[in-house]
Image: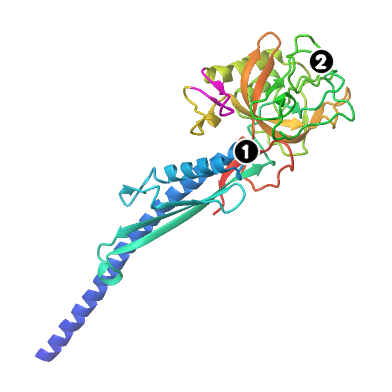
Amino acid sequence: MHAGNRGQVLIVFLGALLALLGVAALGIDAGYLYTVRHELQRCTDAGALAGASAFLSGNWIDGATRSVADGRARVFSAKDMVAASFLSPGSEVSVSFPGPYRVRVDAVRNVNLFFARLFLGPTRTVTAYSTAEASVVDTNVKGLKPWGIPFPWEDTNGNDLFDPGETVHKDCPDGIADTSRYFCPGTRVVLKIGTPKNSPKNPAGLPSLQQEPGHFFALDLDASGASGYRDAIEGESNYPVSLGDSIPLETGNMVGPTVQGTQTLLDADSTSQWNAAASLPESDRFHADDGSWMNSPRVIRIPVYDPEVALSNGKSSMVVAGFAGFWIESIEHHQGTVIGRYIPMKAFGQAGPAPGPTAGPVLRTLRLVE
């Protein structure tokens, strides 16, 4: 082989080697950038979901609620490392509200390249974004407790029964002075009655005292007898319930299973107290200020019916008109009357979207939409 040919082969070899090294460098850095992008996406997912959680118990158009959502989104976006360091909540995370009950989190991180800096420069900017929504839940709702109560109404004749023409309250009016006949934050409500209607042992001044013979607000969520009813109180029923469904009533008062199941929930969070300032429960384990209150066993969800769709002696079911969240305050052990406090828009159930009711209490659940 001539010396000139050997020189040409060397040049071709060096060129091929350089190209191969360039491809390898790009491949290594491309993989690194993909990893950073994945880490960044995980942070924005967490931040968006955390931010949207503020809308579970607050109105998205309220400035204070948005401020809470913004703060949660930034804090949770910066909890995981991206490229070996945490994001700066102020400079690398931005939060916006693109629509009703939605939070969008954008994050950016500049990363140093290794081998590809000769081709792409010393650094590259990686971005990610996520949008989460606190969406209405009204179909296939599971995990309900086996109690069903009516919307509050104006009991104008004082007989503890709904009479035609009496006004049903499905919302909490702004500035209402007496919240005892409305589902307002913190309103005390009878969740499970243990005494017949018009009994002097009934709690005075609380809504949801409508009583028909044999109707004590206990529901049969596809359970089997007293043990199944008690298990549905202590755990989470897998029986799916949607708006408009007709749910069978339990045929008896179920005092014993009610007391046993409810006491189990009370004991599981025994230090829980009602925080009047926040209109939320809090305890040593579950706090009102960080959203962990919603994990308390004493925070429950139940179906609600419209008293205008009256129950009569011949009826053995209730028609679901909505869902509502409550914190169990107490139980009266001799009669099994359960008292709770209303919590607006408690998250729960299968992910939406769903149109939801136009008025009255609604449940919301968190989901990523982008």
Quadrant of the rendered image containing residue 207: top right
SS assignment at label 2: loop
The amino acid type found where label 1 is placed reads: Gly
Q: Are marks 1 and 2 in contact (CB under 8 Å)?
A: no
Q: In the displayed structure, would residue 126 be above or below residue 180?
A: below
Q: Residues within 10 Å of mark 2 (few under 14, many from 20)?
A: many
| Range of magenta residues | 271-283
SS assignment at label 1: loop
Magenta-drawn stretch contains 273: yes
Percent across and percent down for residue 75 are 42, 42
**Relative to 132, 123 lies left or right:** left
The amino acid type found where label 2 is placed reads: Lys
Q: In the displayed structure, would residue 306 be above or below residue 42?
A: above
> Which residue is nearer to you in this view: 328 or 72?
72
| Res. 252 in view | yes
Residue that carries the numbered disc 2 in the rendered image = 197
Percent across and percent down for residue 50 are 50, 42
Where's the N terminus, which quadrant? bottom left
Residue that carries the numbered disc 1 in the rendered image = 349
